[in-house]
Image (tube, grey):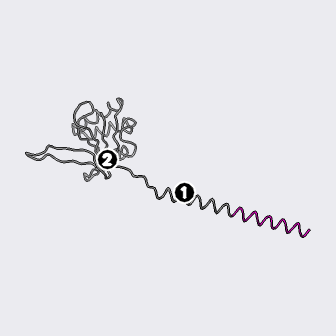
Amino acid sequence: MKVAKMSIAILAIGMALTSCQKGEDTLKDNVGTANIQKDSPTMLKVKTWYHQPAVPNGPSETWYCSGMATNCMSTVTIRPKDLVVFDDIFNALDDNDYAEVLNIIWANGTEVKNVMGNDLHDAVVNGTLKLSYKGESPDGTGEDLYLLFTDNVGNIDAVIPINK
């Protein structure tokens, strides 16, 4: 009887030690994997907005997204359904009727969010950012079109290049 109890105790201790060793090995493997992932950052290219005003008897006004920095987002292609809404927005901006711009954005939230996303849409609607644009309306040809989002001081917070 003593031998049976002793054998059971030794077997239980052996199983416990084996189980703990497997747990430590698994933990070590997971830590090694986590370290590999942590040491391999993903490099992202983000463009910045450049605006060079016209100079008398010099270069004309230019604007573009280029290089590394923080405020130009990926280029968005406006779908025909959304293009109708943005033409109305651009016309209101050309008429300096910002109240009408906000009315159009409010009334056509889905189409506007398709182009500028939820966060920028909400920031424009609640007045945190102001929308403007640079370039020609999507119904024209010529220069590229950019949506500009400025804060209340006039600093450019975000830029979305638009494909016509």
The residue that appears at 76% across and 65% down in the rendered structure is 14
Q: Which mark is residue 103?
A: none
Disc assigned to residue 72: 2
Q: Position of residue 139 (x, y in %)?
A: 26, 30
Q: Secondary structure at mark 2?
A: loop
* In the foreground, 144 or 66: 66
Task: Check the image and report above or below for 84 versus 126.
Answer: above
Q: Quadrant of residue 96?
A: top left
Q: Which residues are magenta?
A: 1-20
27 left or right, relative to 83: right
Q: Amino acid at mark 2?
A: Cys
The residue depicted at 29 percent of the width and 36 percent of the height is 89
Above or below 11: residue 115: above
Residue 97 appears left or right of 122: left
Crowd around label 1: few <14 · some 14–19 · many ≥20 (10 Å): few
Q: Find residue 73 and report its horizontal and vertical position in percent.
A: 34, 45
Q: Residue 16's image quarter? A: bottom right
Q: Is residue 8 magenta?
A: yes
As shown in the figure, which amino acid type bears the numbered disc 1?
Answer: Thr
Residue 68 pos. (x, y %): 31, 51
Q: Which residue is mark 1?
A: 33
Q: Is residue 156 left or right of residue 115?
A: left
- Looking at the rendering, in which quadrant would you find the N terminus? bottom right
Spatial CA span between label 2 and label 1:
34 Å
Q: Residue at x 44, y 55 (%)?
A: 41
Q: Position of residue 38 (x, y in %)?
A: 48, 58
Residue name at image x 80 percent, y 67 percent: 10
